[in-house]
Image: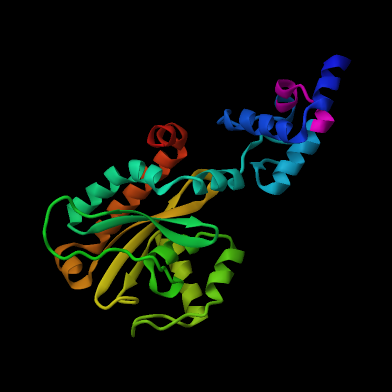
């Protein structure tokens, strides 16, 4: 690099340099080494190293401070996923949810984790049938919601502790309000890969939810089925439902990882 190139780099606003580096790394699935980032941006190696360290500390990239390849970090993934409208998510999730809903004859749904809260995203009833169905609501208390358990169980300990702190209301006889017992339930959820709500919030309602992981962003969504307990368990084996929901979770995770094209089409 000659001195004129250095001068141009020095005059580039810092935010623009950050954007250039993130764009380069995001376009490289195998990541980029420090020297590659320096070469492709035209920034001196020391400047590149300092910038990458700042991005590393902010969670925008992951790597080993100059000794490995840098990849897009969890914070960037979460920012992008949080920016998606429910309409964009519906375009991706609805075909997957509809297959589940039609197979089990009950409502399938997708929830999302945004700004520390679980929110409804997509709800899909079966395409045929006139019987009464159960739909997910807007509240997802940790101690009485399969969705909350499935998502919170896979967050950082700081987030888990915040949810465990409560307070926890006893909605039904089955509702767990003891913090230690809730922590044990979350451990079981992590081991099993799914969570249930067994008559814990609404009378006679049963739901199963599986976490959806989006690469470095971690678990940002959940996919589940909600129904009247007696009807669901008389007609179907829970193990079959869990298996299909785990398959749906994997499909959704893959679709969300290649979301940019789908997102542009949906918007």
Instruction: Work out whether residue 182 or residue 261 is closer to the camera in this orientation and state it.
Output: 261
Quadrant of image for the C terminus: top left
User: Looking at the image, can residue 129 be seen?
Assistant: yes
Q: Residue at x 18, y 72 (%)?
A: 230
Q: Main secondary structure of the magenta part?
A: helix
The extreme front residue here reads 267
**Corner quadrant of residue 38:** top right
Is residue 32 in the magenta section?
no
| Above-or-below relation of 95 to 111 | above
Q: Residue at x 53, y 43 (%)?
A: 80
Q: Residue at x 44, y 82 (%)?
A: 169
**Corner quadrant of residue 197:** bottom left
Quadrant of image for the N terminus: top right
The image shows residue 110 at horizontal and vertical percentages of 36, 54
Q: Residue at x 47, y 68 (%)?
A: 186
In-image side of 243 versus 57 (left or right): left
Instruction: Work out whether residue 207 or residue 124 is closer to the camera in this orientation and state it.
Output: 124
Instruction: Work out whether residue 103 or residue 78 is closer to the camera in this orientation and state it.
Output: 78
In-image side of 241 versus 42 (left or right): left
User: Looking at the image, can residue 153 be seen?
Assistant: no
The image shows residue 237 at horizontal and vertical percentages of 21, 62
| Above-or-below relation of 206 to 253 | below
In-image side of 162 versus 14 (left or right): left
Is residue 38 in the magenta section?
yes
The residue segment tinted magenta is 37-47
The image shows residue 30 at horizontal and vertical percentages of 58, 30
Picture colour scheme? rainbow
Instruction: Work out whether residue 28 or residue 203 is closer to the camera in this orientation and state it.
Output: 203
The image shows residue 92 at horizontal and vertical percentages of 35, 41
| Above-or-below relation of 172 to 248 | below
């Amino acid at each position: 690099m000659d001195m004129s190139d250095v001068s141009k780099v020095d005059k580039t606003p810092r935010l623009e340099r950050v954007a250039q580096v993130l764009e380069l790394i995001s376009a490289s699935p195998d990541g980029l080494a420090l020297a590659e980032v320096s070469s492709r941006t035209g920034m001196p190696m020391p400047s590149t190293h300092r910038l990458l360290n700042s991005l590393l500390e902010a969670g925008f990239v992951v790597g080993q401070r100059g000794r490995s390849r840098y990849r897009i970090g969890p914070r960037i993934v979460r920012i992008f996923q949080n920016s998606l409208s429910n309409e964009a998510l519906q375009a991706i999730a609805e075909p997957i949810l509809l297959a589940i809903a039609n197979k089990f004859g009950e409502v399938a749904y997708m929830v999302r984790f945004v700004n520390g809260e679980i929110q409804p995203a997509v709800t899909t009833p079966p395409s045929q049938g006139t019987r009464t169905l159960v739909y997910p609501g807007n509240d997802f208390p940790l101690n009485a919601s399969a969705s909350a358990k499935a998502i919170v169980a896979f967050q950082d300990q700081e987030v888990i502790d915040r949810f465990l702190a409560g307070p926890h209301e006893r909605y039904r006889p089955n509702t767990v309000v003891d913090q230690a017992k809730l922590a044990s339930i979350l451990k079981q959820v992590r081991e099993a890969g799914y969570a249930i709500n067994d008559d814990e919030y609404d009378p006679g309602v049963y739901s199963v939810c599986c976490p959806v992981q989006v690469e470095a962003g971690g678990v940002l969504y959940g996919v589940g089925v909600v129904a009247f307990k007696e009807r669901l368990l008389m007609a179907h084996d829970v193990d079959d439902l869990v298996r299909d929901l785990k398959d749906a979770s994997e499909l959704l995770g893959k679709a969300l990882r290649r979301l940019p094209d789908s997102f542009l089409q949906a918007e």
